[in-house]
Image: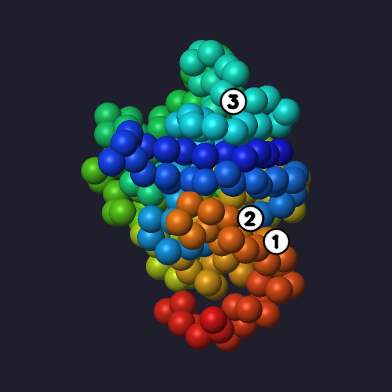
Amino acid sequence: MLRLASVSRVHGQGAAEVHALRSVDLEVRPGEFVAVMGPSGSGKSTLLTLAGGLDSASSGQVVVEGTELGALSRKALAAVRRRSIGYVFQDFNLIPALTAAENVSLPRELDGLSGRKARAEALAALEEIGVAELADRFPDEMSGGQQQRVAIARALIGDRRLVLADEPTGALDSATGEAVLAVLRGRCDAGAAAVMVTHEARHAAWADRVVFLRDGRLVDESARSSAETLFSGVGPDGTGGL
């Protein structure tokens, strides 16, 4: 579903050069839920933006469902993002002038689906996340947690087979966050793939595999059984078990 082959990302030049990612190799298979952890500045969000085609690698290849993103035109890349990739941003990125349903349905309408069918899919996605009652509200009429759930619904609409989520539970209370993770887990169990950046050990325990970044390098990974052991006893505040 997703393959990063020797992917590096360098920002700036000379004395200002920053290596955000260094020769990262990562494969994510259909049905797999992968959590990405690491300290601040380790390259977690950079990995997601490259996997989602929102930025370009300085070297290496990013391949989504057999398509190398770096070889695509801007138009073709935009089409892949709309059809294959669902992206949950840390800052939500909802369009203020559109209602929740309109924000969620927009990618499908841009892809040629009729407004009525796109709205029906949007309502189904909002219902799946538990916020169907927000369909006709605008972002400034919602709390931060409500906006985050609408943004997650937008990432799940349609037939997207790869979901990329950057701290998707950051604005949510514990119970709602667990419910959202259960939805992501269910999507993967149905054959999609998900990559989630998180700093919460209890959230990473939902994943099949946890990979760890430090200074732009993938330094370790644990399978689900190992992760469950590693994170056992983690409390509601994320302490313990490590």
- Where does the image place residue 130, in percent across and percent down from the top left? 50, 54
Mark 1 or mark 3: name the one nearer the start of the chain: 3
Q: Which of the two residues, 55 or 105, is positioned nearer the viewer here?
A: 55
Query: In the rendered view of the protein, which quadrant contains the N terminus?
Result: top right
Q: Nearer the viewer, residue 197 or 70?
A: 70
In space, the residues marked 2 and 1 are separated at their CA atoms by: 6 Å
Image depth: mark 3 or mark 2 in front: 3
Q: Amino acid at mark 1?
A: Asp
| Helix, strand or loop under label 3 | helix
Q: Which residue is mark 1?
A: 208
Tell me the SS state at disc 2. Answer: strand
Tell me: 42 left or right of 66.
left
| In the rendered image, the vertical position of residue 153 relative to residue 59, given as above or below | below
Q: Closer to the camera: disc 1 or disc 3? A: 3
Q: Residue at x 53, y 13 (%)?
A: 73
Residue 145 spot, x, y in % from top left: 36, 56
* Pointers 1 and 3 in contact (C-beta within 8 Å): no
SS class of the residue under badge 1? loop
Task: Give the quadrant of residue 211.
Answer: bottom right
Residue 34 is tagged as 2
Q: Residue furthest left?
A: 140
Number of other residues with Cα within 10 Å of mark 1, as a class: few under 14, some 14 to 19, many 20 or more: many
Residue at the (45%, 56%) spot, across then down:
215
Q: Is residue 135 visible to the viewer in this orientation of the structure?
A: no
Give the CA distance from mark 3 to mark 2: 20 Å
Compared across the picture, whether 95 is left or right of 57 comes to: left
- Kindly identify the amino acid type of the residue bearing the numbered disc 2: Val
Whole-angstrom CA distance, mark 1 to mark 3, is: 25 Å
Q: Which residue is the site of mark 3?
A: 69
**Dot 3, crowdedness within 10 Å: few (<14), some or many (≥20)?**
many
Q: Residue visible at 62% across and 40% down? A: 6
Q: Are marks 2 and 1 in contact (CB under 8 Å)?
A: yes
